[in-house]
Image: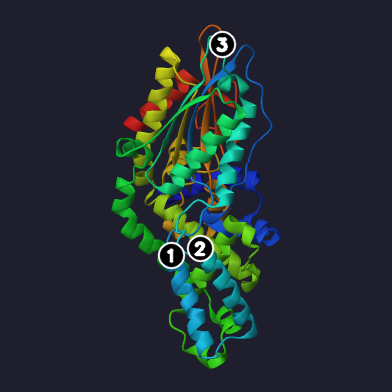
Amino acid sequence: MKFKLLLISLFAGIFSLAAQTDIREAIKANPDIAGSIYSSYHCDATAEEPAPKGYKPFYISHYGRHGSRWHSRDSLYVVTLKYFEDAAAADALTDLGRDVYGRMKVLYADAAGRAGQLSPKGVAEHRGIAERMYRNYPEVFASSPKRRCRIEARSTLVPRCLMSMTSFCERLKELDPSIEINREIGKRYLPFMFSVKNMNAVRPASQADADRWIDGHIRTDRFISSLFKADYAASLRNPKFLMRNMYRMSCITQDVDYLGLSFHDLFTEEELFSLWSGYNVQSYLTYGPSAKYGDAMMADAAALLKHIIGDADEVIASGGRAAFLRFGHDVNVVPLVSLLGVEGKCARVTNDNLENLHEYWCDTYITPMATNVQFVFYRNKSGEVIVKVLHNEGVCRLPFDTDIFPYYRWDDFRKYYMMKMSE
């Protein structure tokens, strides 16, 4: 079984590498790539492939992660800053340490009271996605005396998701005020918008595996000695905790880029790659398609995919709306991508092969801020329906045959996934 899973992961990795360039080289060229799940949105749009003759888009179904944000807990900033406050009081900071302390104070002052909120960059990300969707599929958003453009939009209860929905919908209304959008949040939508029951059940084990892997790959001596004087550095409590936190501070600065701050200079290329690798393992084990835990994650995504299919069936049968827009979290969009079996983004790697995970699965590319999956539906005059799936606005190859790639016949799509979810 392990050999079979390794073959699967190697096969998937071929496509992942071809699409994403070598992650180590990418980080060297742009350290923000090491941002893991905190990476700002990057649109992976591919050249638009014309639909088969006679087919026109009429409906879009969408699930998107909230956009760029501040860190989700104020305490992360507080406990990290405290290391530097205490060292400053003891006159134990190096020149670099004093400089970093100044940067940390600026970062903390900006973030105070904003934990988890959508940043201005997050607003811009969703406005951009909305505008490109509108420009790329004008037929879907067109209004006429015979057709009202009606859109349903839903968000989880988390404010950054609500603000993402608002930013997206506001841009659509600016582009065409005649578009009608019904926006709602509520607990009734959480069973398909935020299904994490299985994920939470295995999370203690998956997080423990991830923490062991990260701590086993962190080397702190050079990093700590660059910030703190020798005697103080030797007695520093939990240096791995501080190094991990400073990595997360370096990740979040791209999401609040108006500050002009960076902490990338604190890490060597190898340290930055190792830290990113660790957090890539963490996101993979805790909500990705791993061989050990991935089945539980994908089971959570079934409710969302069933809602997408059911809503599409309803629109195909009777019309009534041009789009259904959903706004949630990475812990939902990643399992959806995994359940769909998108080529190059669903490798099933075993825990004993995590050392090479970065060759097969990269969270930076799979779930940056504002990650989205779009299902674009087309119909011809005979009523035949086809669908194209986009991940971060790039076309997806799905695990069943089609003679019209990147389009799939809706009957084939529906049959394949309903059967998969019944197994």
Spatial separation of the CA atoms under disc 1 and disc 3: 52 Å
Amino acid type, label 1: Asp
Q: Position of residue 243 (x, y in %)?
A: 51, 73
Q: Is residue 329 above or below residue 111?
A: above
Whether the residues at callouts 1 and 2 have beta carbons within 8 Å, the answer is yes
The residue at the far top in this view is: 382
Q: Is residue 253 above or below residue 422?
A: below
Residue 416 or residue 317, whichever sits in front: 317
Q: Earlier in the sequence, mark 2 or mark 3?
A: 2
Q: Position of residue 96 (x, y in %)?
A: 64, 80
Name the image quarter holding the C terminus: top left
Q: Earlier in the sequence, mark 1 or mark 2?
A: 1
Q: How many marks?
A: 3
Residue 346 or residue 140, whichever sits in front: 140
The residue at the far right in this view is: 29
Residue under label 3 = 380
Residue under label 1 = 74
Spatial separation of the CA atoms under disc 1 and disc 2: 8 Å
Amino acid type, label 3: Asn
Q: Earlier in the sequence, mark 1 or mark 3?
A: 1
Q: Is residue 334 visible from the viewing direction of this image? A: no
Say which mark, if any, is on residue 111: 2
Residue 282, by quadrant, is bottom left
